[in-house]
Amino acid sequence: MSPERLNVLYVSQMPASPPRFGAQARMHGLMTQLARRHDLTAVMLVDDEFDAEECSQAMQAYCREVVLVPNPRGREGFGKRLFQLRSLASIRSFERLRVTVPAMQAALDRLLLARRFDIVNLEFSFLGHCKLRQAPPGERLPAIVVDSHNIDYDLARQYARTGSSMARRLYAGVNWRKLRREELRTYRDADGVYLCSAADEQRLLEEIPGVRTAVIPNAADIEYYQPRPTDPPSDGCSVVFFGLLSYIPNVDGVIHFVQDIWPRIAEAHPKARCKIIGGRAPQSLLALAGPRVELTGFVSDLRPHLAAAAAVVVPLRLGGGTRLKIIEAMAMGKPIVSTTLGAEGIEAVSGRDLFVEDQPADFANAVNRLLAEPGLAARTGRSARQLAVRRYAWSGAARALEEFYRRILEARS
């Protein structure tokens, strides 16, 4: 591989660091590794939920320059709901409307016209309307590469079928079609698209057969997420789910687990406890809390909670890409029970590296086995850790992404 340093501009609807949930963890993991060999610049929107100063300081540790643009439409609550309703009358999706910020394009213009970039790496497709193919006079235009965290219109289409209310299903039914048009156009206009899983790659190639693609799987910081002597041992009774609790697939998965699966575990193991870790839980999840079901809220360090867990569960029924939560739990050496969709894209063997079950009774039985057989739980956790180290370190994922960049640049030349 050529040792030449690449000049890469990262463009995103959210800051990459410090990583607090899956999308940020993917960006942070790849960017920090790439920055060891290449020059990175970032232009990213900042919603109200983020501390811009904290994000800027964290990203300056590995970026040559960081430009964070406040998003006046990046609000939660009633304002967001009202904007979603207004978006129904637009030909553009809600996701695109909320990131159409003139100050963002102005920041991009300033950087792209002042400095030559080899690659513009666009996170997600929502900012695909931005003018990214720009360069100083006489310089070659940059290649555009998109990181598709999910096939987002397909995710929205799933919401249209399974939404918690008729209003949500009707809204998603209108919005996903607009999102599909925008997302596929962004992919067509790009020089390359990289995806989290082979399944998502196949979905995209069925839509756009000629697009240049690569699978860059999600990974984990295997040095950070690893068993440590200072962590508490497994308590033999805690069943843990963790993730951003405002994310619809996580909301659906937690409700499904607590209502349909947990009662079978609680009956078989009177000392078992269910711990749900994550920030921004809606009222529908907060209402699930009880004597044996705890919602911790956001925690700054997951590792002690994972170390103490007897099992980690990933009962997802919606979504795409690959689940960072599984890889991080694997890196911590924890036994995991997941649905097929939850484990999609992860090269793990059910019964050796984790357990995959889709029916509530079977899922509960797998958790019950892990609670009843500490030896089985320990063996499964060790195998999971070995797989994470061998296959799912950010260093390897970043090397694969670098190779994809170079293939694209060679094809253009």
Image: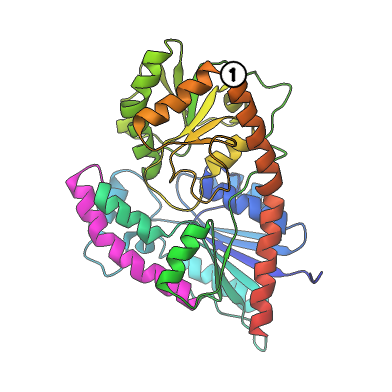
- Looking at the image, residue 89 sits to the left or right of residue 305; the answer is left
Q: Nearer the viewer, residue 396 or 180?
A: 396
Q: Residue at x 73, y 70 (%)?
A: 6
Residue annotated with mark 1: 374
Residue 305 versus residue 152 in the image, above or below? above
Magenta extent: 163-189
Vertical order, 287 against 36 (above or below): above
Residue found 26% across the figure and 53% down from its top: 160
Q: Is residue 171 magenta?
A: yes
Label 1 sits on what residue type? Pro
Give how far across and how far down residue 100 sits, in percent. Answer: 40, 65
The foreground one among 50 and 195 is 195
Whether residue 246 sits left or right of residue 225 in the image: it is: left
Residue 29 showing in the rendered view:
yes
- The crowding category of the residue bearing disc 1, from other C-alpha atoms within 10 Å (few below 14, some 14 to 19, many at least 20), is some
* 164 w.r.t. 72: above or below: above
Look at the image and name its color scheme. Answer: rainbow
* Dominant secondary-structure state across the stretch colored magenta: helix
Q: Secondary structure at mark 1?
A: helix
Q: Quadrant of the C terminus?
A: bottom right
- Whole-percent x, y for residue 267 in the image: 36, 14
Q: Is residue 291 visible?
A: no
Of residues 128 and 316, the one drawn nearer to the viewer in this rendering: 316
